[in-house]
Image (tube, grey):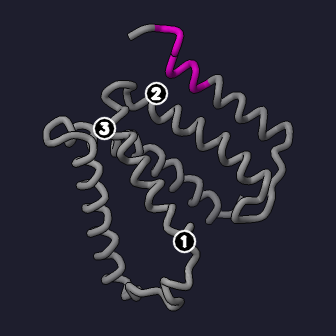
Amino acid sequence: MKGWALLGIAAAVLIGALLPLQALVNARLGALTQGALYASFVSFLVGTCLLGLVLLGTRTPFLPAVSVAALPAWIWVGGAIGAVFVFAATFLVPTLGAGAMICLVVLGQVVSSLVLDHFGVLGAARPADLVRVSGALLVIIGAALVVRPWQSG
């Protein structure tokens, strides 16, 4: 495996490790203020300001080379999905706990990724073979062991 691939794997693991902390921080902000919606808004506002500073620092143009009106309408759904994730995580962490919430999110990501890859949605098709499906089944088992839906409270 090449160095850049290993660096990418390490970065993905680090980012994944930060997501439960983000959810916990946002949930605490919501508990100390006006709730999950407010905390989610603040989270996106801080992130937007930070990315704006990075754009300025890297001298990246704010406007794309192609006309925004020429882009397909569905291209904006990424931001909406991000907002739904941050709000849901902020709302659910106090009830489910960070571990269970993240495990369930990962489960949804793995299953959805296999389906999207299999059908080549927005990219090259990567068939859901027996090995990949077996990996997804292990994630299902892992999520069940962390969440333990058979136990109350």
The answer to whether marks 2 and 1 mark residues whose Cβ atoms lie closer than 8 Å is: no
The residue singled out by tag 3 in the image is 24
Q: Is residue 123 left or right of residue 147?
A: right
Magenta segment: 142-151
Residue 111 versus residue 76: which sits nearer the camera?
76
Q: Is residue 131 left or right of residue 20?
A: right
Q: Dot 2: what SS?
A: helix
Q: Is residue 6 left or right of residue 104?
A: right
The residue lying at 47 percent from left, 54 percent from top is: 81
Mark nearer the N terminus (3 vs 1): 3
Q: CA distance from mark 3 to mark 1?
A: 33 Å
The residue singled out by tag 1 in the image is 73
Instruction: Look at label 3 and name its amino acid.
Output: Leu
Residue 108 position by quadrant: top right
Tally of numbered discs: 3
The answer to whether marks 3 and 1 mark residues whose Cβ atoms lie closer than 8 Å is: no
Neighbour tally class for label 3: few under 14, some 14-19, many 20 plus, Cα within 10 Å: many
Answer above or below: position of 152 versus 99.
above
Q: Residue furthest left?
A: 33
The residue singled out by tag 2 in the image is 100
Q: Is residue 11 left or right of residue 9?
A: left
Residue 72 versus residue 61: which sits nearer the camera?
72
Residue 144 horizontal/vertical position (percent):
58, 21
Q: Is residue 117 magenta?
A: no
